[in-house]
Image (spheres, helix red, strand yellow):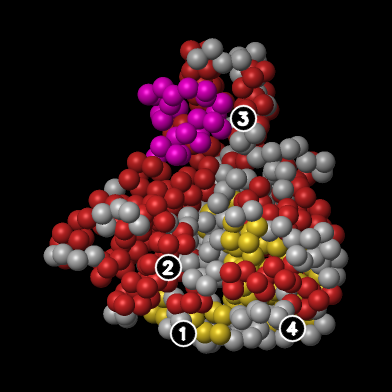
């Protein structure tokens, strides 16, 4: 079966898919065509994950994935949701520039296929429903980079471009990202129906979510409560994964939080260069709500908003229901803290757990923060440092102006390694496997964007290959080097 047949037939084989919920949950409409589309980039690992045939990038696929055509059986739709944005209720939102084309089924896994930038929908509000080449490249590269880092995420299959102009701060050219995920359902989908008092619709949506994405919760005494705890645990694991690679999500609104624990919506984002716990990656976040160190607490706040949306589904006195949902959220902090410590132990090469490990990790991060030491480079150099054989620190020590403070921490670290009988030759390869050499720094993305805007897409392809093997030493050393001076002037905002 080729891709066209597969994409057209899967919805028919899954009659209980999201579209079966009805018109109150979505709007069916075609995409808006783009003139003169062309291929910009594609991810072969993503295509393989979807089970696409080797020749999937046909002219016909180009037209479909640019919004200019539909394969037989496609019934595109955009969903409605609401949410809290920067801590304030924003009212009705929805898929303002995203259209779902259908579903793929491969090796027992179902994937929703979605076009981002395919034109206006009823939920676009005052937007044009388009995406620009600049932001599309960032989302495409980061989606695939996060997947390669082992972090739960939506995926990006390809980008198509067009000469059509799109007005942002300046006029830019249009692009469409084809992205895929088991589901794009967000906290905001449930919030929407709860806030508007549509409790029957809320129950229908919850039944869909449970049956398709959390069937193990159906046998629980109170399934929505069991589901909330599942989401809380998944979100805690996700935030720990983010933090440990120095990733910042710039718009952690409830409408950008996945019910499946995926990284969702790569608008303004950034990986830390110099380690700064109060770093804000979104130039539009004037209050610093989504600063790096605040993100775990913001996720917890968002989970409380989700819990509030689930209250109408549970019978009983309001106070008792609130207490029950609060208990479902209780594991979040412990799961996050344990997941962070487990990941940081691995980054430091510690093979077993000891009570004082948290203090060793905390002091290491304080040391990085004191000097604004490059987060990725510091951990990678730590992965090359034979601490037992060369106690002076070498290239790692050179990252710190306060040599004495580094030396005191290094003494504790070596003592800790000695207690567990660590062997440099065994530990360092383990550390390199969890401390990436390359992440998608802003200047790397910007270089690819500038070349693409000039009509050269080769740098996107080259950089994608590097990002798909983040733990390997790159052929081009500059990919893993300190950012250039000009990178300090780069800014990303909600229009990015």
What label sits on residue 431 in the rendered view? Answer: 3
Q: Nearer the viewer, mark 3 or mark 2?
A: 2
Q: Which quadrant holds residue 435?
A: top right
Labels 4 and 1: the sequence-earlier one = 1
Q: Main secondary structure of the magenta part?
A: helix
Circle 1/circle 2 CB separation < 8 Å: no
Specify few, some or many for label 4: CA neighbours under 10 Å numbering under 14, 14-19, or 20 or more.
Answer: some
**Could you tell me how far apart the alpha carbons at marks 4 and 1 are, in whole angstroms?**
24 Å
**What span is in magenta?**
337-360
Labels 3 and 4: the sequence-earlier one = 4
Circle 4/circle 1 CB separation < 8 Å: no
Left or right placement of residue 214 versus residue 184 in this view: left
Circle 4/circle 2 CB separation < 8 Å: no
Labels 3 and 1: the sequence-earlier one = 1
Determine which residue is flagged by label 1.
23
Q: Residue 314, can we see it?
A: yes
| Quarter of the image with the C terminus in it | bottom right
Labels 4 and 2: the sequence-earlier one = 4
């Amino acid at each position: 079966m080729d891709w066209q047949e597969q994409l057209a037939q899967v919805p028919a084989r899954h009659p209980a898919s999201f579209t079966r919920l009805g018109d109150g949950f979505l709007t069916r409409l075609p995409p808006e065509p783009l003139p003169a589309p062309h291929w910009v980039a594609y991810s072969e690992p993503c295509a393989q994950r979807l089970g696409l045939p080797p020749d999937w990038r046909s002219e016909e696929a180009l037209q479909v994935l640019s919004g200019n055509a539909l394969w037989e059986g496609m019934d595109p739709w955009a969903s409605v949701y609401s949410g809290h944005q920067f801590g304030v209720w924003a009212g009705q939102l929805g898929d303002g520039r995203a259209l779902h084309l259908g579903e793929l089924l491969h090796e027992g896994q179902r994937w929703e296929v979605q076009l981002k930038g395919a034109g206006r929908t009823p939920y676009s509000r005052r937007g044009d429903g388009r995406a620009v080449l600049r932001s599309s490249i960032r989302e495409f590269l980061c989606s695939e980079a996060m997947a390669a880092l082992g972090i739960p995420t939506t995926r990006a299959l390809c980008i198509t471009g067009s000469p059509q102009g799109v007005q942002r701060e300046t006029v830019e050219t249009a692009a469409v990202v084809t992205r895929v995920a088991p589901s794009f359902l967000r906290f905001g989908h449930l919030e929407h129906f709860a806030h508007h008092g549509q409790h029957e619709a809320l129950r229908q949506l919850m039944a869909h979510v449970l049956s398709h994405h959390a069937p193990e919760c159906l046998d629980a005494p109170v399934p929505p409560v069991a589901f909330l705890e599942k989401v809380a645990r998944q979100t805690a694991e996700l935030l720990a994964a983010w933090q440990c690679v120095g990733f910042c999500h710039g718009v952690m609104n409830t409408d950008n939080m996945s019910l499946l624990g995926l990284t969702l919506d790569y608008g303004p984002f950034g990986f830390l260069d110099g380690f700064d716990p109060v770093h804000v990656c979104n130039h539009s976040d004037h209050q610093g709500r989504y600063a790096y160190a605040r993100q775990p607490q913001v996720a917890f706040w968002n989970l409380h908003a989700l819990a509030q949306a689930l209250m109408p589904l549970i019978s009983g006195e309001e106070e008792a229901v609130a207490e029950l949902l609060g208990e479902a959220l209780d594991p979040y902090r412990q799961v996050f803290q344990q997941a962070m410590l487990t990941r940081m132990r691995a980054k430091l090469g510690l093979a077993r757990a000891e009570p004082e490990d948290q203090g060793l990790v905390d002091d290491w991060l304080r040391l990085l923060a004191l000097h604004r030491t490059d987060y990725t480079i510091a951990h990678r150099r730590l992965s090359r440092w034979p601490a037992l054989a060369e106690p002076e620190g070498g290239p790692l020590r050179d990252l710190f102006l306060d040599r004495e403070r580094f030396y005191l921490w290094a003494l504790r670290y070596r003592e800790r390694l000695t207690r567990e009988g660590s062997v440099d030759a065994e530990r360092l390869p383990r550390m390199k496997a969890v401390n990436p050499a390359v992440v998608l720094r802003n200047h790397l993305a910007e270089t690819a964007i500038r070349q693409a805007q000039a009509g050269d897409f080769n740098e996107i392809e080259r950089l994608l290959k590097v990002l798909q093997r983040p733990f390997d030493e790159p052929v081009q050393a500059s990919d893993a080097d300190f950012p250039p001076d000009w990178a300090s002037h780069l800014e990303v905002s909600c229009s990015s």
